[in-house]
Image (spheres, rainbow, N blue to C red):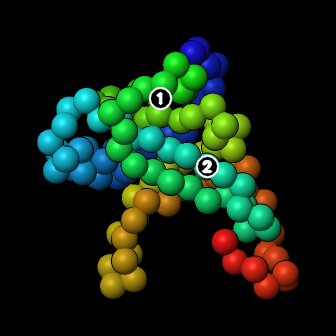
């Protein structure tokens, strides 16, 4: 699939961390899969995991030494997003997704996703 706009970008820190995790997995054929689904008032919920299979309908983003796969139902939800890896010291570390499509509205319904 050819896109005029890259759906997601990765910071240098995220690329380094994904490479480290891929080395730990020991499987060169793995790609990073990103899935997004609406999560009510809170915006989106994301899943990221390593996947050996590229589906014909996947959008493939070349991140240098690995690929990022985005399924067809997630592409519009993550378009323009940036994936970062943050080390917050004692508060933990992990991947963070800055998504311009997320509304950022808080909800008063009392339900949390």
Among the two numbered marks 1 and 2 on one chain, the one whose residue lies closer to the N terminus: 2
**Residue 80 showing in the rendered view:** no
Determine whether the residue tagged by mark 2 lies in a helix, strand or loop.
Answer: strand
The answer to whether residue 32 is above or below residue 83 is above
**Residue 29 showing in the rendered view:** yes
For mark 2, what is the residue?
Answer: 36
| Left or right: 4 as drawn, with respect to 66 | right
Q: Quadrant of the N terminus?
A: top right
Residue 78: quadrant of the picture: top right
* Residue at point 54%, 35% (across, down): 70
Q: Residues within 10 Å of mark 1 (few under 14, many from 20)?
A: some
Which x, y percent locates residue 43?
Answer: 72, 61
* Residue at point 35%, 52% (across, down): 13
For mark 1, what is the residue?
Answer: 61
Residue that extends furthest to the right in the rendered view of this protein: 108
Which x, y percent locates residue 6?
Answer: 57, 29
| Viewer-nearest residue: 13 or 40 | 40
Number of the label disc, if any, that sits on residue 83: none
| Viewer-nearest residue: 108 or 51 | 51
* Residue at point 72%, 55% (across, down): 38
């Amino acid at each position: 699939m050819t896109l005029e706009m890259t759906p997601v970008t990765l910071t240098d820190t995220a690329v380094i961390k994904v490479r480290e995790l891929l080395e730990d997995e020991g499987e060169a054929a793995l790609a990073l899969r990103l899935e997004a689904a609406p999560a009510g008032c809170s915006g989106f919920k994301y899943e990221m995991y390593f996947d050996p299979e590229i589906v014909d309908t996947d959008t493939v983003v070349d991140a240098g030494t690995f690929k990022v796969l985005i399924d067809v139902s997630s592409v519009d939800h993550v378009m323009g997003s940036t994936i970062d890896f943050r080390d917050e010291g004692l508060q933990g570390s992990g991947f963070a997704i800055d998504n311009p499509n997320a509304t950022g509205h808080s909800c008063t319904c009392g339900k949390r996703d």
